[in-house]
């Protein structure tokens, strides 16, 4: 019984410390938005991936960076309507 409480408290600590890990009330839209933003941030941080995307899309590296930054605003579209409780 003590192990179960310890695991839950560790999980709650991680969820409060790192936003991307979610919590019990995280919606599917919030989780997907975090995943897309994390991916785009990773792409922006890796110079070789920017070069690859630019070559594959026949665009400049600056345009690829700009597009990735724009996608971070609302990667999954506007948030869905929440039902009023």
Image (spheres, helix red, strand yellow):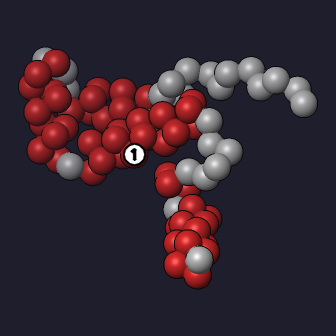
Residue 8 in the image: x percent, y percent? 58, 68
Residue under numbered circle 1: 38
* Residue lying farthest to the front in this orientation: 1
* Residue lying farthest to the right in this orientation: 85
Q: Is residue 36 left or right of residue 76?
A: left
SS category of the residue bearing label 1: helix
Residue 83 in the image: x percent, y percent? 82, 23
Q: Is residue 64 left or right of residue 48?
A: right
* Residue at left offset 31%, top offset 35%: 65
Residue 76 in the image: x percent, y percent? 51, 24
Q: Is residue 75 above or below residue 24?
A: above
Choose between 29 and 76: the one closer to the eye: 29
* Residue at left offset 65%, top offset 25%: 79
Q: Is residue 33 above or below residue 84?
A: below
* Residue at left offset 58%, top offset 37%: 30
Quadrant position of the C terminus in the picture: top right
Quadrant position of the N terminus in the picture: bottom right
Q: Is residue 11 above or below residue 51?
A: below
Choose between 77 and 20: the one closer to the eye: 20
Find residue 5 and report its image quarter.
bottom right
Choose between 57 and 16: the one closer to the eye: 16
Regarding residue 82, the answer to whether it shows in the image is yes
Regarding residue 10, the answer to whether it shows in the image is no
Structural crowding at the residue carrying mark 1, measured as other residues with C-alpha within 10 Å and reported as few (<14), some (14–19) or many (≥20): some
Q: Is residue 14 above or below residue 76?
A: below
Residue 71 in the image: x percent, y percent? 44, 29
* Residue lying farthest to the bottom in this orientation: 2
Q: How many marks?
A: 1
* Residue at left offset 35%, top offset 39%: 40
């Amino acid at each position: 019984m003590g192990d179960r409480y310890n695991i839950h408290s560790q999980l709650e600590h991680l969820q409060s410390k790192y936003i991307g890990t979610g919590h019990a009330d995280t919606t599917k839209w919030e989780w997907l938005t975090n995943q897309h933003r994390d991916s785009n941030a990773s792409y922006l941080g890796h110079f070789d991936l920017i070069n690859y995307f630019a070559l594959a899309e026949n665009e400049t590296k600056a345009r690829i960076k700009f597009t990735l930054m724009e996608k971070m605003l609302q990667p999954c579209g506007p948030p869905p309507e929440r039902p009023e409780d």
